[in-house]
Amino acid sequence: MENTLARRVAAEFLGTFLLLMAAGHIFATAGILRLYPQGTNGPVTVGVINGVDKLAEAFAVGLVLAVLVVVFGAISGGH
């Protein structure tokens, strides 16, 4: 099957969408995007993460990116 322009664009779009969704889920699960209230009616602040969480997040995002390159690389040619 030939990799037409439509297939390559669709693969790039789907790969980018999945990467952003996976990274957002990883960051939200790790606590970067989670908001913690400082009282009943006070402002909210972003949670603090430590170095181990940052390493785990970097590894998880890199692993997702590697899988997406393997899956869509032959189609889009963007590898």
Image: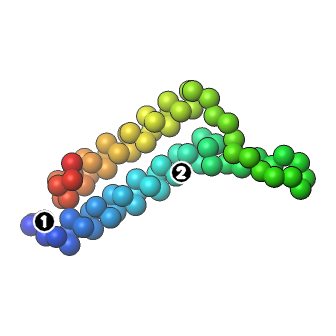
Vertical relation: 57 (above or below) 25 = above
The amino acid type found where label 1 is placed reads: Asn
Q: Mark 1 highlights which residue?
A: 3
Q: CA distance from mark 1 to mark 2?
A: 31 Å
Vertical relation: 40 (above or below) 4 = above
| Image side of residue 4 versus residue 33, left or right | left
**Outermost residue toward the left?**
2
| Image side of residue 74 versus residue 57, left or right | left
**Residue at (25% x, 47% y) in the render:** 70
**Outermost residue toward the right?**
40
**Count of labels in the image:** 2
**Outermost residue toward the top?**
52
As helix, strand or loop, the secondary structure at mark 2 comes to helix
**Residue at (56% x, 27% y) in the render:** 52
Residue 65 pos. (x, y %)? 35, 45
Residue 67 pos. (x, y %)? 32, 45
| Image quadrant containing the N terminus | bottom left
The quarter holding residue 47 reads top right
As helix, strand or loop, the secondary structure at mark 1 comes to loop
The amino acid type found where label 2 is placed reads: His
Q: Give residue 54's mark.
A: none
Residue 56 pos. (x, y %)? 50, 32
Vertical relation: 58 (above or below) 44 = above
Q: Give residue 25's mark.
A: 2
State how the image is colored: rainbow
**Residue at (44% x, 55% y) in the render:** 20
| Image side of residue 44 versus residue 53, left or right | right
The quarter holding residue 9 reads bottom left
Counting residues from the N terminus, which is met first, the one under dot 1 or under dot 2? 1
Crowd tier of the residue under label 2, counting other residues whose Cα lies within 10 Å: few below 14, some 14–19, many 20 or above: few
Asked if labels 2 and 1 touch by Cβ distance under 8 angstroms, the answer is no
**Residue at (13% x, 65% y) in the render:** 3
